Amino acid sequence: MATWNVDLKGIHKEVAADPAPLVHVLAGPGTGKTFAMIRRVARLLEEGIPPERILVVSFTRTAARDLREQLAKLGAPGADNVRASTLHSLCFSILGTEQAFDFTKRSPRPLLSFEIDCLETDLADFFGGKRSTRKLLAAYEAAWARLQHEDPGHAKSAEDQRFENELISWLRFYQAMLIGELVPLALDFLKSNPALGAIPVLDHVLVDEYQDLNKADQNLVKLLATSSALLVIGDDNQSIYSFRHANPEGIRTFPSEIPGTKVYKIEDCKRCPPNIVAISNALIAHDPHTSRPSPLKPDLAKGLADVWVVQHGSLQEEVEAISDFVHHYLNVHGDVNPGRVLVLAPRRFIGNAIKEALIVRGRNALSYFQEDALSSPLAAEGFCLLTLLVDDSDRAALRAWLGFGSADYRRGAMGRLRKYCETTGTGFVDALKGLAAGKIKIPHAKPLEARWKALQLRLPALHGLSGLPLVDALWPTTAPEVLDVRLLAQQIAYVTADPSDLLDELRVAITQPELPGSDSDIIQVMSLHKSKGLTRDLVVVAGCMAGTLPFLDDKDTVEIQSAKLEEQRRLFYVAITRATKVLVISAAATLPLSDALRGGAAVKKRIFRDSKPYAVTSFTPFLGELGPSAPAPLSTSEWKRQVGIP
């Protein structure tokens, strides 16, 4: 007896049941697009399709985990054996199985954020500074297909080719790779070696969040689905990853690019109350290129959400008021898990300030900004030590260790050391040993020698340690700036004490974090980007100042600024559609000038308080696009009075 269609009706049933080999689904937030895809997989399994010949692709490890869990709950035959993974994980598996890393003389050792910073610093002088280097790096990771109409493949210009040559040379010398390289490397390997049979044998490929894929990702999906049915689900209104050259045109133009594609639109929003649907539709209607100006239809049976728009007198007042509100809300609603609360901020320093204020109030809170756990030098240094404890010849970790304590990571001395190694054929570690022993002379390399000797003093003290004692030695309790990485490492150390396993698990947890579920006791604080795919009772969007949201670079062309404005409108749309019961949109009217400048806030004027410079800012202009359903902004005191916070 079929179970895939139990309690399934309407368009979700149509999507799940459609036998068409090419299916395209446009669906907004909270409309159940993933639910329809899961039921489609259940139908395929019940019809006898081998689970290993079904590939379900998602953009994040958290989404892949959720897909596997939902499949398991259905109880469909073979659900545990369905391939559900991110594209990057799939590519790593393909390249590893086919020994492609050996063929290309590349190492599968991924770089972390602080090691990538070393790479960018080393290349910056040759390519117009770190900002230009980062742009070139992102284009390389997109296989140089910067725009939707461009084909991924080789470098597009002489400058691109020169950058690629220097980048690959750096990565080969330091025996490392970028996570972002995996898709271009796999795509090139599979296309260049058709006789190897390395493409997995598949009958069905299903892709969630297709709008998050850049052109190289899209081409890889189509290559994997060469002999199989393909379903893509996404929402151009939630396309927010242009920094990796993903473009909303990818999901918009899919049906026209592949004739015969069956097209569906899912519009009924089951997540958000009607008033949040109204302000979301009003916001996205200002996007001149959206495929659906009113993408969501409200469930009128739902009650209205509590929506608050608050402008605080200062950033400190905003931090304290939000923390008071969350604390008060959880006290009043004792049946709500703290994991049902989500705090979003466009800038890390704002989010982390709220996190710290929540901790002061006795609440468990963690931040999930990109590799935030290693943002402090002491946290990164501890990770370096763990890496070198496991493998004392790890070149990428050595590069970072030798550079710590210098603004440019001792770029000049490191460049001379690398040149010596490449010219003489001397190994990197052997050269460092020779330098320390006085057998090798490299100009102005005394700081490298000192750092190498410091490492030789630190590592012996760590030998023999494992589990929690090792974590304590690497990230001491006396250093509050290492708290995030310490907590992650402790969780892993409780399960595995071996240093090598600890390193592997911690690297994955940092570079590809899986967010805790909403049933946890942890209030999650993160960027707006990170929130996509989440649903929470209470959502706070803090730091909504002009200049931070949207953030536009005056150095960009008018066309690029216009595209960024549209994307950041979509980002705000993603943020406000996470909420099911309470939504708070918040901003500060003043903040220290240094914070305003580093956060990109638009400074209307400068004032002084206690002889210190402050910036006067304004609310995000997106506030004026929320339509008549949006409430009028309140002051902090009036908000607290209406909420009932003493």
Image (spheres, rainbow, N blue to C red):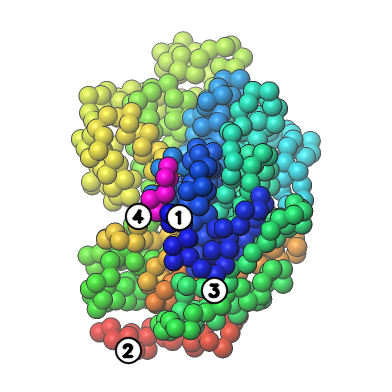
Tag shown at residue 516: 4
Residue under label 2: 641
> Label 3: which residue?
268
Q: Position of residue 609 (x, y in %)?
A: 42, 76
Q: Quadrant of the N terminus?
A: bottom left
Q: Tell which circle, 2 or 4, labels the residue nearer the N-terminal end.
A: 4
- Residue type at mark 4? Pro
- Tell me: 27 left or right of 109: right
Q: CA distance from mark 4 to mark 3?
A: 27 Å
Q: Amino acid at mark 2?
A: Arg
- Depth check: give the residue in front, 380 or 612: 380
Q: Nearer the viewer, residue 126 or 612?
A: 126
Going from N to C along the chain, the mark reached first, 1 or 2, is: 1
Q: Which residue was labeled with disc 1?
A: 2
Please tell me whether mark 4 sits on a helix, a strand or a loop: loop
Circle nearer the viewer, 4 or 1: 1
Q: Earlier in the sequence, mark 4 or mark 3?
A: 3
Tell me which amino acid carries mark 3: Asp
- The residue drawn where x is 35% and y is 55% is 516
**From the viewer's perspective, is the residue at label 1 or at label 3 nearer?**
1
Q: Nearer the viewer, mark 1 or mark 2?
A: 1
Q: Residues within 10 Å of mark 1 (few under 14, many from 20)?
A: few
